[in-house]
Amino acid sequence: MRMASGPVRPVIGETPGAPRVLWVGVVGEAWLCLSRAARALGCEPVQAAVAGGVAGEPSSRARPRLVLVHWRHVRERGPGGLGGLKARVGASGAPLVLVVEPETPAEVLEAADAEGIEDCLVTPVSEAAVRARLSALLGKSPVAPASERYSPRVVLLAGAGGARTWTGLGSLLEASGHHLLYSATVEGAASRVEEHGARPHLLVVAGDGAWGGVWARASATARALLDGVPTLSVTPAECARAGALLPRVHTLLGRDGASLRVEERVPFCCPVEFAEGESKAAPWTSGVSFAMSPAGLFVRTLVPARPGAAVTLRLHLPTTGERLESHGVVAWANPCARKESLCAPHGMGVRFLGMGPPRLMHLRQLCQATSPA
């Protein structure tokens, strides 16, 4: 196949002002799938052979809506070749999807985690997989409302240090699928409630004293607005012990065990393919996991399966070259959507089901081998 020397742009059917979809890689099957999916949804596909190939264009329209990057074309910089990748491709504010093979080195995926990529596609890339992500970004795919059992909880965290106060607990709650709002004061938390129009499920206040100094200094207006919201007051010392605090928070949220033992997860990078149900005709898509425990894992993807759905999993283990297959249930899911200042990870938490003793022991060994000393 003849390679293009520079960016490739469609001439026929191009819509002025259409959202751009950028592919960083060679012209091949993946590019053709992306092009067909983008045009079908009224987007403009753009190809660049190297990172930064179109980022320097002056027009604000040059900023892409979605970026797909093949890992082999960004190896030349930084650990795993992904250092500063979003800035290099002009993907500020746009989700970045890394395209990998099942045998992609673990250090590449670790670098992708550090870079903050939002999704991962395993080759061969299908048109349906690209189209699903574009539909989610453009708001063209309906999102079924989750039942109360599986719906995420909105948690307000108020402390004098703002988000810095909640580095430990906040990250654990985000990894459990909850939606978080951070504020330095209770007044700020009350303003967030008015801004989002959604009643929070819990207010956690950090301060000095049994009632929390931040809460004690709250105005009557803020107290009235948050009246009836369950409140947990904690001291700075308790904030530092986030693992011990998490079960208390989950009990108040009515989601005991929903964390998938998040405090026990260890870093473990691997591409993950998944399909809803056990039907052979069920469509497969993919994502990437950066943390795992023997109980389950978090899959980062823009198009998670439905909360409560049974899923079939294929875990490609870069450390051993194996493919581990298992079944699971989606304990929580956060599909791609505009959440404004709400902090929530895109993806889903999957609890393993029906894993036999030999496979479970193998998984425990893998987790122990990657846990920090």
Image (tube, rainbow, N blue to C red):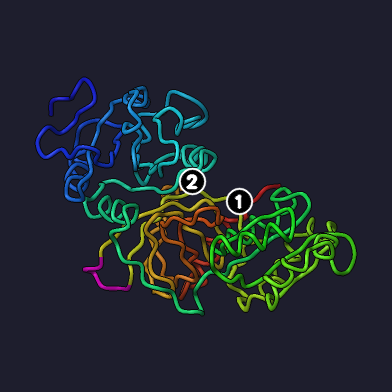
Q: 321 or 243: which is nearer to us?
A: 243
Q: Where's residue 282, x and y in %?
A: 25, 68
In percent of the image, x 49 and y 30: which residue is there? Answer: 84
Amino acid type, mark 1? Ala
* Residue bounds of the magenta highlight: 277-282
According to the image, label 2 marks what residue? 319
According to the image, label 1 marks what residue? 369
* Quadrant where the N terminus is found in the figure: top left
In percent of the image, x 36 and y 22: which residue is there? Answer: 56
- Residue extending furthest toward the right: 209
The answer to whether 48 appears left or right of 310 in the picture is left
Q: Dot 2: what SS?
A: loop
Q: Where's residue 359, x and y in %?
A: 48, 66
Evaluate if marks 2 and 1 touch, with contact meaning CB atoms under 8 Å apart.
yes
- Residue extending furthest toward the front: 221
In percent of the image, x 28 and y 26: which residue is there? Answer: 49
